Image (spheres, rainbow, N blue to C red):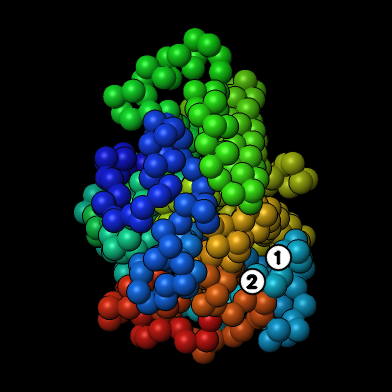
């Protein structure tokens, strides 16, 4: 993770007289991030148009965007719903999203043309992973890296100063290989989703404890080391240092925000307990890849904790832009927990073997279950304007490979979740007419307040019907 971001501060914004969120943070010694409270939201933002402010909803609440990548495409027959429109039925793979159905758009017809082979031959996994958020063709080299700026970093450059962290880069890949990975392509393409320049990937963090302490470590940089020493010595959570102050501050919040603060503090404490418990379990049982401290023993718990942290990052307005690489494209992880000991990548080359296709579809469904859990977390948390975090978010879930057996990059499996603060039309399955996925990202940038962008990557225009 690029730690230089931690030094960037939000710009000074004039505040109305009275009690503000800034005062609340100062009262806590800026030692813990807090949710966005309606009673602390500047009145001049309430009712503001989304066109007037960057990365805010019409009500003035923060608008967030996250990009989640899953590997190796899908089994198309099990992924796509049979009908279009609002009365579609979820497919077998997407069934776990039933409780979130009204918050989803299943988007068909989107392509990643920059990932196609053309004259470069093999290397579809590197191209799928490395171009998914950039829409820019990669240079096939292990050393001379040339990619593109990813959409999350385009957003971060414009709105990053509004939050403590311009963007958050997460991964559940503990392995960080270098050199050649896929058919002559640099490993950097295959193991990074976010790029700040054509030659500079944004290194993602896989250790939940490091991410958590970066976001919620007590005190300023000069104070954090001493606070952490005290925490270890006294075997207390970070919140113990601010709990008394937080309780005192509760009296100055309205009842709705008091309940929200209680929910938030409870969630932070529970998350710390879970990370600590995961550390006690030891490294994953893989002697070839020793896991760093803080990485849970099981892949499912690793994903779950990372999604909890991402939820907290959005809830506290620590960032409004995030990426998460669930696993790199080409991942050959096995799923013995669900009765599939074979490697995912090996199975994806099924050559129409029905048993292998069934197992790949089960893996696809397992990943969707993790997505459903994350969206459920966002839906449960109330935002400053009374809506859920999910309502005030745009969550892209997708893969740069469509059919893993054919290594195709057209009709990508992509879901857009959330209402974008009321600017999106969820609750439907819609097929677009062969449009670059970059068109979707350009439309999302518009909603984040970046309407001045003429194009992005290989975009051919805005995706109008979202």
In what element is the residue under mark 2?
A: strand
- Identify the residue position indicated by label 1 in the image: 100
Residue ID at (33%, 78%): 451
Rendering coords of residue 296 (x, y %): 60, 32
Decide: is 463 above or below 365. below
Q: Which residue is mark 2?
A: 104
**Circles 2 and 1: CB atoms closer than 8 Å:** yes
Task: Judge left or right: residue 406 versus residue 352.
Answer: left
Q: Quadrant of residue 240?
A: top right
Q: Is residue 458 visible?
A: no
Q: Quadrant of the N terminus?
A: top left
Left or right of residue 377, residue 166 in this image: left
Above or below — where is 174 with respect to 294?
below
Could you tell me residue 21's position as x and y percent?
43, 47
Relative horizontal placement of residue 233, taking residue 351 as reference (left or right): left
The spot of residue 292 in percent (x, y) is 48, 27
Query: Could you give the CA–CA distance between mark 2 and mark 1, rounded to whole angstroms?
Result: 7 Å
Compare residues 236 and 415 and report the one nearer the observer.
236
Residue at position x 59%, y 85% from top? 431
**Count of numbered labels shown in the rendering:** 2
**Nearer to us in this view, 315 or 348:** 315
Image quadrant where residue 229 sits: top left
The residue furthest front is 17
Tell me which residue sits at (51%, 89%) in the image.
433
């Amino acid at each position: 993770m690029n730690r230089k971001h931690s030094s960037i501060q939000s710009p000074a914004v004039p505040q109305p007289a009275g009690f503000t969120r800034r005062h609340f943070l100062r009262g806590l010694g800026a030692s813990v991030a807090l949710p966005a409270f309606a009673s602390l939201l500047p009145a001049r933002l309430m009712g503001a148009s989304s066109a007037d402010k960057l990365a805010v909803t019409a009500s003035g609440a923060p608008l967030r965007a996250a990009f989640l990548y899953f590997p190796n495409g899908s089994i198309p027959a099990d992924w796509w719903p049979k009908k279009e429109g609002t009365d579609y039925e979820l497919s077998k793979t997407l069934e776990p999203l039933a409780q979130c159905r009204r918050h989803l758009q299943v988007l068909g017809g989107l392509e990643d043309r920059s990932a196609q082979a053309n004259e470069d031959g093999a290397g579809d996994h590197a191209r799928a992973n490395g171009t998914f958020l950039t829409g820019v063709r990669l240079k096939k080299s292990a050393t001379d890296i040339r990619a593109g700026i990813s959409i999350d970093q385009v957003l971060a450059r414009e709105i990053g100063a509004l939050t403590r962290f311009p963007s958050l880069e997460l991964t559940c890949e503990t392995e960080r290989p270098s050199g050649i990975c896929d058919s002559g392509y640099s490993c950097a393409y295959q193991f990074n989703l976010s790029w700040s320049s054509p030659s500079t990937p944004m290194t993602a963090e896989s250790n939940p404890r490091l991410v958590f302490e970066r976001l919620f470590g007590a005190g300023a940089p000069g104070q954090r080391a001493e606070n952490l020493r005290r925490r270890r010595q006294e075997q207390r959570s970070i919140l113990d240092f601010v709990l008394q102050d937080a309780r005192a501050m509760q009296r100055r919040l309205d009842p709705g925000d008091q309940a929200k603060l209680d929910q938030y503090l409870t969630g932070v404490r529970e998350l710390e307990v879970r990370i600590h418990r995961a550390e006690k379990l030891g490294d994953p049982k893989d002697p070839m890849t020793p896991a760093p401290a803080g990485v849970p023993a099981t892949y499912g718990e690793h994903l779950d904790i990372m999604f909890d942290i991402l939820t907290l990052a959005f809830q506290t307005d620590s960032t409004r832009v995030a990426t998460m690489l669930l696993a790199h494209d080409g991942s050959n992880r096995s799923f013995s927990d669900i009765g599939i000991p074979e490697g995912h990548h090996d199975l994806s080359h099924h050559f129409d073997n029905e048993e292998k296709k069934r197992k790949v579809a089960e893996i696809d469904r397992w990943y969707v279950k993790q997505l459903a859990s994350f969206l459920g977390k966002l839906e449960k948390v109330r935002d400053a304007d009374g809506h859920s975090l999910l309502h005030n978010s745009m969550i892209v879930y997708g893969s740069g490979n469509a059919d893993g057996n054919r290594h195709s990059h057209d009709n990508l499996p992509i879901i857009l979740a959330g209402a974008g603060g009321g600017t999106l039309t969820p609750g439907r399955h819609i097929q677009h007419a062969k449009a670059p996925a970059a068109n979707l990202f350009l439309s999302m940038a518009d909603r984040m307040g970046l309407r001045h962008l003429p194009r992005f990557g290989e975009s051919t225009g805005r995706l109008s019907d979202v």
